[in-house]
Amino acid sequence: MPDDAGSWTEPAGIRGVGLVWARSTGGVIGADGGIPWHVPEDLAHFREVTGGATVVMGRRTWDSLPERFRPLPGRRNVVLTRDTAWSADGAVVVHDLAAALDTDEDVWVIGGGQVYAAALPFADRVSETVVDAAVTGDTTAPTLDAGWTVVDEGPWQASRIDDTRYRFTEWRRA
């Protein structure tokens, strides 16, 4: 929540905040409430990265998950929404970012674009899948500035279903 000066303050109980996303080479992460590609290896990577942690998402991201996967299994699901009347089975509902991040558990922010942008100042790591695809969309990944350093960049690989190229990149705040 903003302090008196209007800037965001870090929640007291915060342990580690990461952002995880898949983006096209042009920065697109979403189109019409969905992901504009299907790379099963990225989904497996997402499960591995976020497993056992708290995942924080906006309400639209929650709604975009297939119903059979809500809540995401093996994780504490926190949904950030401005709608004080909204609720969902299996989700912890919060109405401000400070409440979403105020935990002593590891946190992974999983979308959408507004939540990524708000959480970026508190993040210390980003796990990114870069998908070699020219797609249009309505949501883009935040731009990481010079304060971020690539600590691991995997090789380009081809998806087993359609040869879409992708690679995993890990960033840390410098």
Image (cartoon, helix red, strand yellow):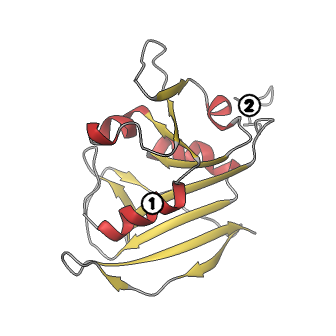
> Relative to 146, is 76 above or below?
above
Q: Answer yes or no: is residue 27 visible.
A: no
Proximity of marks 2 and 1: CB atoms separated by less than 8 Å: no
**Residue 44 falls left or right of residue 76:** left
Q: In the orientation shown, which residue stands out farthest toward the top?
A: 85
Query: Residue 104 got which mark?
Result: none
**Residue 41 falls left or right of residue 127:** left
Kind of residue at disc 1 = Phe
At mark 2, the secondary structure is loop
The image quadrant where one finds the N terminus is top right
Residue 19 x %, y %: 56, 55
Using the image as rendered, state which of residue 8 and residue 112 is in the foreground. 112
List the residue tagged with mark 1: 46
The image quadrant where one finds the C terminus is bottom right
For the residues carrying marks 2 and 1, which lies nearer the camera in this image? 1
At mark 1, the secondary structure is helix
Residue 107 x %, y %: 62, 47
The quarter of the picture where residue 73 lies is: top left
Q: In the orientation shown, which residue stands out farthest toward the left?
A: 162
> Relative to 167, is 92 above or below?
above
Report crowding for label 1: few under 14, some 14 to 19, many 20 or more residues within 10 A (C-alpha). Answer: some
Kind of residue at disc 2 = Gly
Query: Which numbered disc flags the more N-terminal residue, 2 or 1?
Result: 2
Residue 112 x %, y %: 44, 45
- Residue at 72% over, 37% down: 8
Query: Residue 6 got which mark?
Result: 2
> Relative to 128, is 20 above or below?
above
